[in-house]
């Protein structure tokens, strides 16, 4: 392989490293502000969690806070929690299918937490008006439960409150078998005059700066606004905020595996605001257009609230009726590969019952699909290695005449029927495969806490069995700690390099000697499932390459 071609291949490999580094250390740019919401008579932000301002002062125990107010229980097969009747606030939701850690006594993942507790996170609904004499429900309003006393898929609930001015506010809430709440906010005007009101809803989320992920998985605001996807990471949300005007769609707060989302009817016209309220408190709210309710009549505003896990197949089902709802999952640049890869892995997991073996079988199937391309590549590399002494002889002969060396080298390639460029072809194909599988193992909650064999208990996390040779050295980060599987991967890469033609240029030779070390350090902090996949891929490549080399008389 010529020096130029080797340099080109090296550049491609280093580009992969650069892209990974950029994705990991630098979050996406915040999109430009699209619209400015007109000043409302009552600013939605002031309705935000009035008591959320205290969350940074003193954190209360969650169980104590839950006992302070009357609550409406919530329960289905995947959710457990309650709605605070004071303010009709969704502020207590646990996910029954998911544990916080791998420990046997681990508690369930908690999504929504009450205000005044650490990691406060809740949803709230209400009404606004420019008429200051009109009494409206707020965060301190205590609602009355009418009928069913527990919210389940079989028993929807109704909350009512009268303002003493002849106006009745009604919230009808239903829950499906998963994570989707449906809300009907209605107003009955039994007074003698017309009123004008605005429906609103807000999500308030407290997140400490150290918990703001800088991984390749998007965490922060996500929304489909006027059919366009908007994404802003938590670190990029400031107190100036972002304002949008939208027709329908949905808006969400997204974490790696969980999210909450307001979902609107397609004909709903909304003003949306996203902002940082405090150093670690973010608010996402919407306000509908003004609704005039004549005396003796009523008004209705409907929306949905999703509060749960990012289960890919479930979100795909919701996407049948909620446009692009699956984009709450960050599938990345290679969406067209990432999503199919997940479904293939999920299918193989259904057959085998172990996600680790499913990943290995997936690696074998991919190698089988690439077998013809890899064969041509390895045949070319074998021929290159076979004629390497002739190439080196030409370099010695024409060391002072680069043009003559180039002509002689090309003539040699033509005579031996060698195409040096074909050696890089598998690399080009594997780059999108690498990124797509990398994404799958980072975003798929179905792989979270999925065990393999031995010490690997979570395929979505780095190899836990690390060799911490650097931990005793001050200022040396754990980034240099290397797990067993990454070491095995590095060994396979070293063996691959030994089979490849050696670069004639000494500097390039040294660079290629360092590549296994660089990649081993990098893979040490990737999901171990990806490392296992790539290790088997290397092993299969070694076997295939060795067979072809023997076939071509190269040892």
Image (cartoon, rainbow, N blue to C red):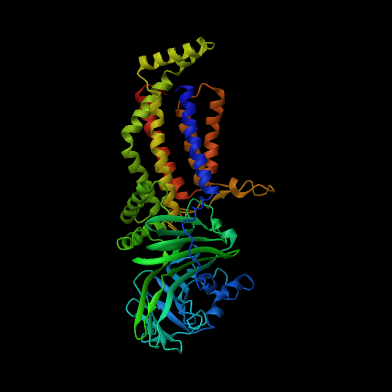
Q: Is residue 259 above or below residue 377?
A: below
Query: Hey, which residue is sitting farthest top in the picture?
Result: 397
Q: Is residue 477 above or below residue 257?
A: above
Query: Hey, which residue is sitting farthest front in the picture?
Result: 193
Q: Is residue 289 above or below residue 341?
A: below
Provide residue 39's location: percent of width, then percent of height. Answer: 51, 67
The residue sitting at 45% across, 27% down in the picture is 500
Is residue 108 at least partly visible in the picture? no
The residue sitting at 43% across, 22% down in the picture is 385
Q: Quadrant of the N terminus?
A: top left
Provide residue 470's location: percent of width, then percent of height. Answer: 64, 46
Q: Quadrant of residue 388?
A: top left
Q: Is residue 157 above or below residue 339?
A: below
Q: Is residue 470 left or right of residue 39?
A: right
Q: State the count of labels.
A: 0
For the residue pair 509 and 75, the one nearer the viewer reads as 75
Is residue 388 at least partly visible in the picture? yes
The residue sitting at 35% across, 56% down in the picture is 353
For the residue pair 72 and 375, the one nearer the viewer reads as 72
Q: Quadrant of the C terminus?
A: top left
For the residue pair 272 and 329, the one nearer the viewer reads as 272
Provide residue 13's location: percent of width, then percent of height. Answer: 48, 35
For the residue pair 260 and 60, the one nearer the viewer reads as 260
């Amino acid at each position: 392989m010529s020096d130029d071609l080797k340099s080109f291949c090296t550049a491609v490999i280093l580009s992969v490293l650069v892209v990974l580094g950029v994705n990991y250390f630098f979050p996406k740019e915040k999109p430009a502000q699209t619209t400015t919401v007109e000043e409302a008579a009552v600013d939605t932000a002031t309705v935000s969690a009035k008591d959320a301002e205290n969350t940074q002062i003193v954190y209360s125990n969650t169980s104590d806070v839950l006992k302070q107010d009357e609550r409406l229980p919530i329960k289905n097969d995947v959710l457990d929690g309650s709605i605070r009747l004071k303010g009709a606030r969704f502020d207590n939701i646990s996910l029954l299918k998911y544990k916080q850690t791998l420990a046997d006594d681990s508690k369930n993942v908690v999504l929504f937490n009450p205000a005044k507790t650490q990691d406060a996170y809740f949803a709230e609904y209400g009404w606004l008006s420019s008429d200051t004499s009109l009494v409206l429900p707020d965060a301190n309003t205590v609602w009355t439960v009418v009928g069913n006393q527990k919210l389940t898929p079989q028993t929807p609930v109704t909350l009512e409150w009268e303002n003493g001015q002849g106006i009745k506010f009604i919230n009808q809430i239903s829950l499906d078998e998963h994570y989707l709440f449906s809300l009907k906010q209605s107003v009955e005007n039994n007074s003698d005059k017309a009123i004008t009101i605005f429906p609103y809803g807000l999500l308030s989320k407290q997140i400490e700066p150290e918990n703001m992920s800088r991984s390749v998985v998007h965490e922060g605001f996500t929304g489909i606004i006027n059919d366009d996807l908007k994404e802003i990471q938590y670190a990029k949300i400031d107190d100036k905020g972002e304002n949008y005007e939208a027709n329908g769609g949905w808006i969400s707060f997204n974490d790696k595996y969980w999210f909450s989302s307001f979902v609107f009817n397609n004909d709903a016209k909304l003003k949306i605001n996203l902002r940082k309220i405090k150093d670690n408190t973010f608010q996402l709210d919407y306000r509908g257009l003004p609704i005039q309710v004549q005396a003796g009549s009523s008004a209705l505003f409907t929306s949905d609230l999703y509060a749960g896990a990012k289960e890919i197949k479930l979100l795909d089902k919701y996407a049948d009726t909620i446009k692009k709802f699956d984009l709450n999952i960050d599938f990345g640049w290679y969406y067209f590969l990432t999503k199919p890869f997940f479904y293939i892995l999920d299918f193989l997991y259904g057959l085998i019952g172990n996600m680790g073996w499913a990943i290995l079988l997936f690696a074998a199937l991919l190698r089988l699909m690439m077998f013809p391309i890899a064969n041509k590549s390895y045949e070319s590399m074998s021929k290159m290695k076979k004629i390497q002494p002739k190439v080196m002889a030409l370099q010695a002969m024409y060391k002072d005449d680069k043009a003559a060396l180039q002509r002689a080298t090309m003539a040699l390639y033509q005579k031996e029927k060698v195409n040096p460029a074909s050696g890089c072809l598998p690399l080009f194909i594997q780059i999108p495969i690498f990124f797509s599988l990398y994404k799958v193992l980072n975003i798929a909650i179905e792989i979270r806490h999925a065990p393999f064999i031995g010490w690997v208990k979570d395929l979505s996390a780095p190899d836990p069995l690390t060799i911490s040779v650097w931990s005793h050295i001050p200022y040396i980060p754990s980034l240099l700690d290397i797990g067993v599987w990454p070491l095995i991967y590095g060994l396979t890469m070293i063996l691959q390099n030994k089979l490849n033609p050696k670069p004639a240029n000494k500097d390039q030779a040294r660079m290629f000697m360092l590549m296994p070390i660089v990649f081993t350090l990098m893979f040490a902090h990737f999901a171990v499932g990806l490392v296992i996949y790539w290790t088997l891929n290397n092993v299969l490549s070694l076997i295939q390459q060795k067979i072809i080399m023997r076939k071509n008389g190269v040892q």
